[in-house]
Amino acid sequence: MIDRTYLRENPEEVREALDDRGADVDLDEILEIDERWRELKARGDELRHERNQITQQIGELVAEGKDEEREEAIEQSTELKSEIEDVETEADELKDELDERLLEVPQIPHESVPLGVDERHNVEDRRWGFDDAHDLPDEVTPHYDLGEELDIIDEGRAAKTTGSGFYFLKGEGAQLEHALIQFMMDLHREQDYVDLFPPIPVKSSSMRGTGQLPKFADDAYRLGGSNEEDYEDDDLWLCPTAEVPVTNMYADEILLQDDLPLKHQAYTPNFRREAGEHGTETRGIVRVHQFNKVELVNFVEPEESYDRLENLLDEAEEVLRQLGLPYRILELCTGDLTFASAKTYDIEVWAPGDDMDDGPEEGGRWLEVSSASNFEDFQARRAGLRYRPERHESAEYLHTLNASGLAIPRVMVAILEYYQNEDGTVTVPEPLRPYMGGQEVIEGHEKVGESALGAGERE
């Protein structure tokens, strides 16, 4: 949530910033609500002051025995009390409306963010790993075909048990997923991250605190109700990202300067309704409704947040560097920033199995595996995250940042395609082998059931 005082004092700057984002927000109406609310608050203060004076006069009139004047003063005090109640009721209603409208206003981009309308105007910062890339098979098999051939990814049976957009991992596929999770967490632990294993359902108030609600309600899985129905603060949603529970675990608390920077990592399954609309993203495990991710969440003092963003990006990149997977870094333009972000870097890994128009010259495509973002005090204001610089000083809003460390299915896609061999097997990256019992190559499994014999489905 942006600072209402900043909005009030700098409306044109905010308007220009939101135009740069392509945000459709009626700032004039919000400012009118704010102005009317402040007028009512001032009127309420005047009326209370006037009533206090009359109350004092009533005491003096009683002492002087002026009964008729005392009765008139009491009547006037009663009328003022009723007027104060009316004014305060309207002010409270406007305050609630103002708070709701401010929740719909996105973050103001940092001045260093490049201008642009959408992802076409993101700026590539650098690439890593292409100079030392190893030789690929003459024809790289896409992960969805390779996973089916090796019988380590099963989308068909997941569609049967749950629906489209879900998948089973089997045998060495499941082992690889577990290996990636543990490898990432061990690596980030060495970077001074403190482990968390958060609850998976999160309340509406937590979703609101990090900016998922109200704007992205349609993308979330709500428990016990339709997304179209009104929801309460205590209603539960399936976790869309560990950013939500981890950021909100300190909601409405005051941390101390000595606590900061505070760095947490959390592995969670994540649930989102989004799905690919066309092309190869409708196949495989690139865009799915449930996926695993290790999330990195930072809480820092405001003056340190942009240095921390660069370090956070490096901490997430280290996963791909150790796995030897080529990737690139993008700086997102104003039009492609997420709702709550002031500045974001995307990490995109190279997956050579599917040629895309916007892929690298080497062929294949880019897959986003992390967004490293600085939210400044935007989430902190929504969730009530503050810190006290010194014990005797007033509490201030801290800054929050996060990055995926990383989104595991897409890293798995890159491994299956980049490390596949001519014979259809996949070499296990060396850092993952200790987590797979020393296994060096994924060779796949024999399929089970009549379908494995080409007999078709059983009647």
Image (cartoon, grey):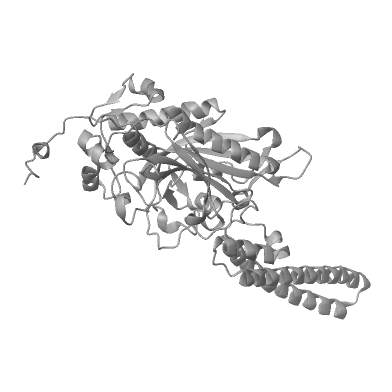
- Residue at horizontal 76%, vertical 69%? 42
Q: Is residue 144 above or below residue 434?
A: below
- In the drawing, does residue 134 fall left or right of residue 215? left
Expressed as whole percent of the image width and height from the top left, the position of residue 22 reads 54, 63
Placement of the N terminus among the 4 image quadrants: bottom right
In the rendered view, tell whether residue 85 sits above or below residue 391: below
- Write the residue at 53% across / 54% down: 337
Name the residue rendered at 35%, 49% in the picture. Answer: 356
Please state which of residues 120 and 242 is positioned toward the viewer in this rendering. Answer: 120
- Specify the quadrant of the image occupied by residue 158: top left
Q: Using the rendered view, name the quadrant where residue 105 is placed.
A: bottom right
What x and y, as percent, mark residue 269?
39, 40
Is residue 351 shown above or below 25? above
Residue 342 visible in rendering? yes
Residue 69 is left or right of residue 124, and the answer is right
| Residue 30: percent from left, percent from top | 62, 69
